[in-house]
Image (spheres, rainbow, N blue to C red):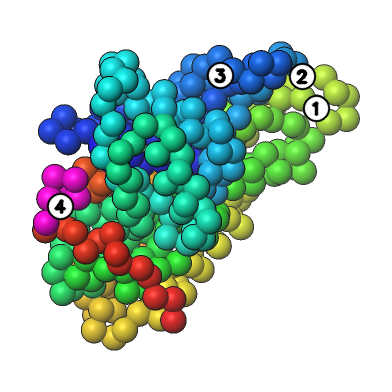
Amino acid sequence: MGIDLGTANTLIYVSGQGIVLQEPSVVAIDQEDKIPLAIGTDAKKMLGRTPNNVIALRPLRDGVIADFDYAEQMLKYFIRRVHQGKTLIAPRIIIGIPSGVTGVERRAVMEAALQAGARDVRLIDEPIAAAIGAGLPVTDPTGNMIVDIGGGTTEVAIISLQGTVLSESVRIAGDELNQAIIHYMKKVHNLVIGEQTAEELKINMGSAYPTYEDEESIMEVRGIHLLSGLPRTVTIKAPEVRESMTEPLSIILDAVKRTLERTPPELAADIVDRGIMLAGGGALMKGIDTLISHETGIVTHIAADPLSCVVLGTGRVLENPKQLERVFSARSRNV
């Protein structure tokens, strides 16, 4: 079983079956008895809409476990769902994690999976898993550059011969883009909106690079007016959403440029030839490939199924353990 334990979504791949589960990484808890009321899609619907005795939360933040007990319960629930409630099966699990996590954070992920019922847990760095899932030739002696923009982290890595030559992990990604939109709406329009509304704005109106067809698109946004304290509707244009996300996008761009600057010349030549591959949910934002291509001068491609790259990569490692065994021991060298 391969798992992409993401800040925003958890995906599970079962050997021989493909992707069998894709659910939001959200848990709704009863405050009194601390029992999960809902997990996944049902819990996400409750975000920002719960009564006082119920809290909907994300057990993962910035790509790592923020609440161990609820992360364990979430994993247990997802594993049980995949096995249709059979409790006797103790699966062998490969989990994709951000390359920049600490040893303590790595152990927390392994411990949560073991407590959830796994018999053997292996960890794989997300950039390598994403590169394998995107179909890059990671076993060849050629340079491959992957930029995986997830919910909590953006992973930038240069990969060659099943190993990470260079990598950089910044804790700026989809969640920070949402927060930037929330901050902009409060500052410019005096409107307080929730995360769900900000995400809706980002998906429907967000773009990283100006395009003619987007300039005139508008969307009505509902929230609480700061001055009157009453509900209000404001009309927002696409350029405003793009402007609100400028800062987090520039941090992601800087990470890409820094990695390119440190790349050995032979591998840099390969990347200029082959281009940069984008994966993760952030790759779905309109114009993100154009922005990176414009800023770096290197052709930028978007993976065929960016959301599933990491979990597909863990699945390929599961099914080709001999061919891809070195990906586990590979550790990035930050020079």
Answer yes or no: is residue 54 visible. Answer: no
Mark 3 surroundings: few (<14), some (14-19) or many (≥20) residues within 10 A: some
Q: Secondary structure at mark 2?
A: strand
**Amino acid of disc 2:** Pro
Q: Which residue is mark 4?
A: 321
- Which one is nearer the viewer's eye here, 270 or 300? 270
Question: In terms of sequence position, does the residue under pointer 4 or pointer 3 come before the other?
Answer: 3
First along the sequence among labels 3 and 1:
3
Q: Which mark is residue 231?
A: 2
**Which of the pair 333/326 is nearer the observer?**
326
Magenta span has 23? Answer: no
Please name the residue that numbered disc 3 is placed on. Answer: 36
Residue 114: give x, y in percent of width and height.
40, 39
**Image quadrant of residue 226?**
top right
Labels 3 & 2 near each other (Cβ < 8 A)? no
Q: In percent of the image, x 26 and y 26: which residue is there?
A: 89
Q: Closer to the observer: label 3 or label 1?
A: 3
Q: Which residue is the site of mark 1?
A: 225
Question: Taking 199 as reference, is 155 above or below it?
Answer: below
**Mark 3 → mark 1, Cα distance in angstroms:** 33 Å
The residue sitting at 77% across, 43% down in the picture is: 187
Q: Residues within 10 Å of mark 2 (few under 14, many from 20)?
A: few
Amino acid type at mark 1: His
Give the SS element for disc 3: strand
Residue bounds of the magenta highlight: 316-322
What's the CA distance linking mark 3 and mark 2?
31 Å
Instruction: Calculate the distance from the C-alpha at mark 1 to the C-alpha at mark 2.
Output: 6 Å
> What's the residue at 31%, 84% (across, down)?
264
SS of the residue under disc 4: loop
